[in-house]
Amino acid sequence: MARVSAIIAHQSEVGVYIMQAPNRSNSQKHDMSWAMLLSFAAVIVGALCLLHYNVLYTEGEVMQGLFTLLVGLVAGFVLIGFHQRLMAAWCIILLGGSLLIWQAYQSRKWTIIHEDVVAIVQFAEETKAKSGQYPTNLDRYSFKNAAVRSHIYRIEPEEPDGFRLTYFMNDPGTSYWYSSRTGFGYYPD
């Protein structure tokens, strides 16, 4: 026997009319609230927005544009909630969570490389203070993380009386550098 969720009786001249509210299907019984869906979306999309600027330094300008579109897509998944909020939540968690994990990994990689770059700059400045010249190679430098060595292109003199350290993150075609005259720089190829 079907469960009747609400009965509205109305008596008129002809007789009594009974209206039943439709029963909820199983998928709707286990759906989540709007507050929960919006909370998931706010936390994940908010975190992705905070990481948005880092994408420029970890991946480059083109990937930052793609990342922006994907963050918009994750935010747009809330609209699926008008049909089924649980499905919307899973879409937000899966795509948004994947983007968070990917960018967290890239930020960690950037931090590891940057830690050695800063130490190389200190090494170069100490070498200049002791010998009067910047180093022409990194043979005497001990890397904090051996994998960073493969990301360093070169250290070279820069006129007048300076040096330039060139390196990359993910794509060898995208150059990053530190110049003793101008500081840190980035150039996408």
Image: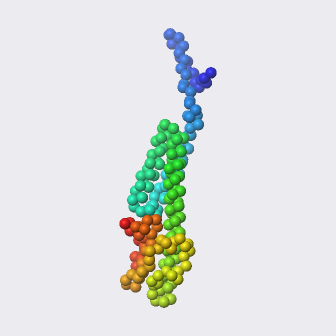
- The quadrant in which residue 146 appears is bottom right
128 vs 33, nearest the viewer: 128
Q: Position of residue 188 (x, y in %)?
A: 38, 66
| Residue 57 appearing in the image | no
What is the image's colouring? Answer: rainbow
Q: Position of residue 150 (x, y in %)?
A: 49, 72
- For image coordinates 45% across by 46% down, the residue present is 76
Q: Where is residue 104 in the image (x, y as percent from the top left)?
A: 52, 60
Query: In this rendering, is residue 85 above or below 119?
Result: above
- For image coordinates 46% across by 89% down, the residue present is 132
On the rendered image, what quadrant is the C terminus found in?
Answer: bottom left
Farthest-out residue, top: 14
Q: Position of residue 3 (x, y in %)?
A: 61, 24
Query: In this rendering, is residue 144 above or below 188?
Result: below
40 vs 110, nearest the viewer: 110
On the rendered image, what quadrant is the N terminus found in?
Answer: top right
Farthest-out residue, right: 1
- For image coordinates 51% across by 13% down, the residue present is 12
- For image coordinates 57% across by 21% down, the residue present is 7
